[in-house]
Image (spheres, helix red, strand yellow):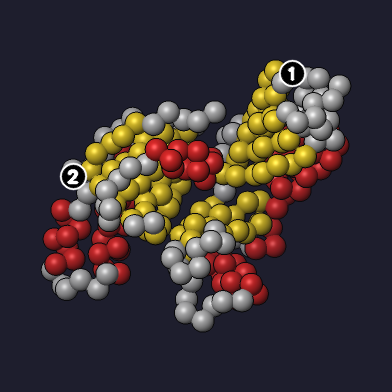
Amino acid sequence: MSRSGAEVLLRLGAADWVLQGPGGEARTGLDEGGPAAALDRLQAAGGLRGARLRVRLGDGWLRYLVLRWPPGVRSPVERAAYLAHRFAEVHRIDAGEWVLGADRDALELPALACAVPAAVLAGLQGFAASEGCVLAGVAGDFAGVYNALRARFDEGEGEHAALALLREGRLTVGMWRAGAWAGVRSQAVRDDGAAALCRMLEAWVRDSASAGALAAGVAEAAGARAGGVVYAAGFAGGVPAHWRRIDLELPA
């Protein structure tokens, strides 16, 4: 049966693949072969021929960082080399085993960068080819939720803002100010994630103050008073003093 024009969602969680499409839900658990091998067992009810396959990857499978391009790094080759260097430095990963990407629109401002296991992308491409569907896009949970909710963000001009996403026991947080990313981090948590969120925000605010070349002592005071808004998606924990939480529903 043709599913031409239909859109289906495939998500890789902590323990399984879940496919949601016109024929209903299909699910397959992971095993020692990993996510790519598990795709071979996934069978969509009614078939996927002609459908558009949209993929979300749980943040536990990815690596994130905020990239600040050094002066003089301009060409695609230079940017690719620096991107690989930063991921090796921060996350100790081999660029040959990962596919690296960064926001191409962020030329002067810090860019959000992400690393995806190459084997997972290869498995997805093979799955799409075997099912006769079009691989319409692959994104991490955090990036997908951020893009889906960003029209609802309404922080004041120059105010710190953060998105806190809690899903499957993993907290992913990104903070920005005036359209520029200050930091992003993803970690497993065993509670509501409030303490981890507090540590992340405090560190990024301090770094932001230092980067602004504030005088000694002024930076510390500014960091202590700084606040903003936390957009919470699945996160119900407390936020630091001077911050307010705005709860937003997780998009489908």
Q: How many labels, in total?
A: 2
Q: Residues within 10 Å of mark 1 (few under 14, many from 20)?
A: some
Q: Position of residue 152 (x, y in %)?
A: 39, 38
Given residues 6 and 229, the one toward you in this image is 6
* Mark 1 or 2, nearer chain start: 1
Badge 1 marks a residue whose secondary structure is loop
* Relative vertical location of residue 170 with respect to residue 226 in this rendering, above or below: above
Q: Position of residue 112 (x, y in %)?
A: 49, 57
Q: Quadrant of the N terminus?
A: top right
Quadrant position of residue 188: top left
* Relative vertical location of residue 184 with respect to residue 107 in this rendering, above or below: above
Residue type at the position of mark 1: Gly
Numbered tag placed on residue 242 in the rendering: 2
| Residue 187 in view of the camera | no
Residue type at the position of mark 2: His
At 47% from the left and 43% from the top, the residue drawn is: 146
Is 143 positioned to the left or the right of 128 in the image? left
Is 82 positioned to the left or the right of 2 in the image? left
Badge 2 marks a residue whose secondary structure is loop
**Label 1 to label 2: alpha-carbon separation:** 48 Å
At 60% from the left and 58% from the top, the residue drawn is: 101
Residue for badge 1: 23
Q: Where is residue 78 in the image (x, y as percent from the top left)?
A: 61, 76
Numbered tag placed on residue 108 in the rendering: none
At 69% from the left and 30% from the top, the residue drawn is: 8
| Residue 116 in view of the camera | yes
Q: Position of residue 213 (x, y in %)?
A: 24, 73
Is 211 positioned to the left or the right of 142 in the image? left
